[in-house]
Image (cartoon, rainbow, N blue to C red):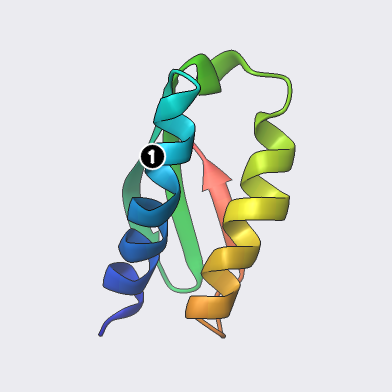
Amino acid sequence: MSPRSDIAAVLDRVRPLLQADGGDIELVDVTERKAYVRLSGKCAGCPSAHLTLHIGIEMAIREAVPDFDQLVVV
């Protein structure tokens, strides 16, 4: 699998959790060791989004893609 498909698979796993709270996440692009995502719905303005992204989702991506570096919100 490619890093992009591995990252997309992680996002597919966490997406139902975000959708249950009225939000969503979209993979916009993957370049080098960074993934660019867009939040929508309640996630876009949620004060906890930073924690969810960087502690939960980013760590899950790092487990799937060992040389992954950074999750960037666009």
Instruction: Left or right? Give the position of 64 relative to 55.
Output: left
Q: Name the residue nearer the viewer: 62 or 12.
A: 12
Q: Position of residue 47 (x, y in %)?
A: 73, 20
Relative to 14, residue 2 above or below: below
User: Which quadrant would residue 19 be assigned to in this image?
Assistant: top left
Q: Name the residue nearer the viewer: 15 or 74.
A: 15
- What residue is drawn where x is 61% and y is 59%? 58
- What residue is drawn where x is 45% and y is 58%? 35
Relative to 34, residue 21 above or below: above
Q: How many marks?
A: 1
User: Which quadrant would residue 31 be assigned to in this image?
Assistant: bottom left
Q: Position of residue 22 (x, y in %)?
A: 44, 18
Residue tagged by mark 1? 16
Q: Position of residue 3 (x, y in %)?
A: 36, 77
Q: Name the residue nearer the viewer: 31 or 58.
A: 58
Instruction: Left or right? Give the position of 73 relative to 7.
Output: right
- What residue is drawn where x is 65% and y is 65%? 59
Relative to 26, residue 22 above or below: above
Relative to 34, residue 55 above or below: above
Quarter that holds the N terminus: bottom left
- What residue is drawn where x is 55% and y is 75%? 68
Residue type (three-letter) at the residue carrying disc 1 = Pro
